Image (cartoon, rainbow, N blue to C red):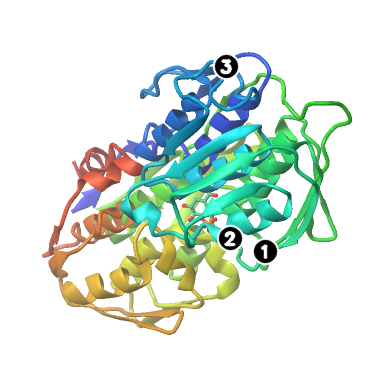
Amino acid sequence: MSVHGVVRPPGDKSISHRVLMLAALARGTSEIRGILTGEDVKSTAGVLRQVGAKISPIRDGVAVTVSHAPLAPLGAGSRTTHDARLYCGNSGTTARLMLGMLAGLPGSATLTGDASLRRRPMRRVTEPLKEMGARIEERGDGLPLTIHGGKLRGLTYSSPVASAQVKSAILFAGLTGNVPVSIREPYRSRDHTERLFAHLGLGIHERDGAIVFEPAVGPSGRPAAFKLSVPGDPSSAAFMVAAAVLAEGGELTIENVGVNPTRTGFLVVLERMGAQVERVNLRDEGGEPVADLVVRPTGLRGTEVTAAEIPTLVDEVPILAVLASRARGATVFREVGELRVKESNRLELVAANLRAVGAQAEAHGNDLHVAGTEKPPRGKVETAKDHRLAMAFAVLGTVPGADVRLSEKKSVAISYPNFFRDLKRCFA
Ligand code: S3P
């Protein structure tokens, strides 16, 4: 099958969460365009509404307005009473970043989520937040947990994991607590929070490799209301890029894709594997670089993906592994242990599902090994309701002779509600 035409990926998930949170803290009414309408972002909006923010309905093609900052004690003027129970759905970003934001606000809240989210580690954020003075009641390393926000002290922190969620939770706590924070990470993770802070004039800079936030002098760390457009999500675009690379002919344009270098490891590795992805119309959108991508089908060769590259493509490992299974030779992903604690155990499930469709793949310790094959992929795939597994294997199902059956398809609504429509469109 050939690809052709133009697709536009949905708004960036990471940026959508952060922009909603900052708009909820801002003085006045903010207006956001291009926000992701996926379930995860709706979880953040729901939680912010519960703590007092007014957010208009999140719908495709409609600007979202956000007002009424939740800086009053939790629950004041909102639907909840003092001890709010905040449901974060499937969204790790909602849970971890909200913990940071709530740490510096007066009041108490219990955070919980679906079965997948309740299994995910939270100590990576509760530990630094407790060091800042937040009181947190935990029952093990996960949700549900209760946070009592209030007065915080500054923090200098070296994170053991390269996690933008950990870094951002601390930055949000610094903002709402009006205290300075400094964070180091083993490898630089996505820097959307830093860019947004800078764009909104909040005191952020880099000093000797550390990210430093220093609140403005004065009582409140609240930004002024703003207008902003969210760029398209490179992690969602990656599935369309992959479909085009694997196609038998044609050319696909993917419009309005965020190309922040902390997110484009997928494109770097793909180019090393032999693919041609042209970036055209490079521009700036709210402090983020954006481009259109032009992709043509190509044969691929295996490669080694290094530990330092992983944070720049952490959500793209499933689709890169799928591409590696169609490449000439072997591919290895180094130090991808973090994939065990994503929406599912992605390390084991990517390998098991590739084997289920007739490819060779295996996790050795924290490394993932994939061998390329020309055999058509055939078999049943267990998505474990993980959106990125569903989309990665749906793309594998587009290669000639494939018969890939997914255990479910609904999970794509977490990050890319129109995924199947767009996939169909580029082959139509
Ligand atoms: C995200 C950071 C990453 C990523 C997730 C979104 C964010 O998680 O996997 O999908 O928006 O900050 P970690 O911080 O756990 O690496």
Q: Residues within 10 Å of mark 3 (few under 14, many from 20)?
A: many
The residue drawn where x is 72% and y is 49% is 133
Q: Decide if ligand 1 comes within 8 Å of the CB at mark 2.
A: yes
Task: Name the N-terminal-most of marks 1 and 2.
Answer: 2
Q: Are marks 3 and 2 in contact (CB under 8 Å)?
A: no
Looking at the picture, does residue 137 appear above or below residue 335?
above
Which one is nearer the viewer's eye here, 194 or 286?
Answer: 194
Marks 3 and 2 sit apart, C-alpha to C-alpha, by 30 Å
Marks 1 and 2 sit apart, C-alpha to C-alpha, by 8 Å
165 left or right of 401? right
Which one is nearer the viewer's eye here, 142 or 338?
Answer: 142
Q: Are marks 1 and 2 in contact (CB under 8 Å)?
A: yes
Q: State the image quarter where residue 58 is shown.
A: top left
- Callout 2, which amino acid? Arg
Task: Name the N-terminal-most of marks 3 and 1.
Answer: 3
411 left or right of 375? right
Q: Decide if ligand 1 comes within 8 Å of the CB at mark 1.
A: no
Residue 124 is marked as 2
Image location (x, y in percent) of residue 17? 51, 37
The residue drawn where x is 19% and y is 61% is 399
The residue drawn where x is 39% and y is 47% is 236
